[in-house]
Image: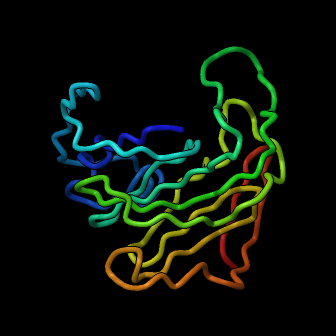
Amino acid sequence: MRIALFALVVVAASAQDWPSFRGPGASGVADGQNLPVKWDVQRRVNVLWKTQIHGLAHSSPVVWGDRVFLTTAVSSQPGATFKPGLYGEGTASDDLSVHQWKVICLDRGTGKVLWERTAYQGVPKEKRHIKSTYANSTPATDGRVVVAFFGSQACMPTVSPATCCGSGTWAGWMSGLRCARVRVGRRQFAYPL
């Protein structure tokens, strides 16, 4: 289990959307934001909100309008974790229990969970490194659609525009979506066909 603290992201994105990894144009730059240089979670200094999010993820949250989107992989094994730090080469995690790969939408102003969808549930198709998680890829949005990629699970869910950035009913995952998967060394990429 982890506690998601998105105060810095919420502040950084106050004047612009942050639609993908490293923000607009993948530049990692948020101009003119007057960011805090200090914060303290325990005393809530420069922390707008905090929300408990179950599971493990190394993905970054993305922001569009008043929504924050993030991914997580929730193990059915109690106490599942990864091992941070510098300590040699490491090994694979032995957690091959049933997992749920999720996309979660939070209210940007309050941190309230607006919706949570399970993209895939099952036993992982391959082991993960002990320093890693099963939800490493950052989701992306254009304000109409949110896309998340969960690596070897070959699941690329798409959220309907109505649920993404406004009111409406859930339209479900896009069925029949074909995507090409490319592996270069240890890196995986996917794009819709």
Residue 130 location, x and y as percent?
Answer: 72, 30
Give left or right: position of 184 versus 82: right
Q: Exactly how many numbered labels are in the figure? A: 0
Quarter residue 17 falls in: bottom left
Work out whether 113 lies above or below 3.
Answer: below
In this picture, residue 167 sits left or right of residue 101: left
* Vertical comparison of 130 with 188: above or below: above
> Could you say which is closer to the camera, residue 95 or residue 14?
95
Q: Quadrant of residue 4?
A: top left
Residue 70 shows in this picture = yes
Q: Residue furthest top?
A: 87
Percent across and percent down for residue 173 are 60, 78
Q: Locate the N terminus by quadrant.
A: top right
In this view, 42 is above or below 27: above
Looking at this view, is 149 or 52 the one in front? 52
Location of residue 147 in the rendering, given as x and y in whole percent from the top left corner: 55, 68
Q: Can I make out residue 38 in this image? A: no
Q: Position of residue 21 (x, y in %)?
A: 48, 52
In percent of the image, x 43 and y 81: which residue is there?
A: 161
Q: Residue at (75%, 35%) from the top-left corner?
A: 129
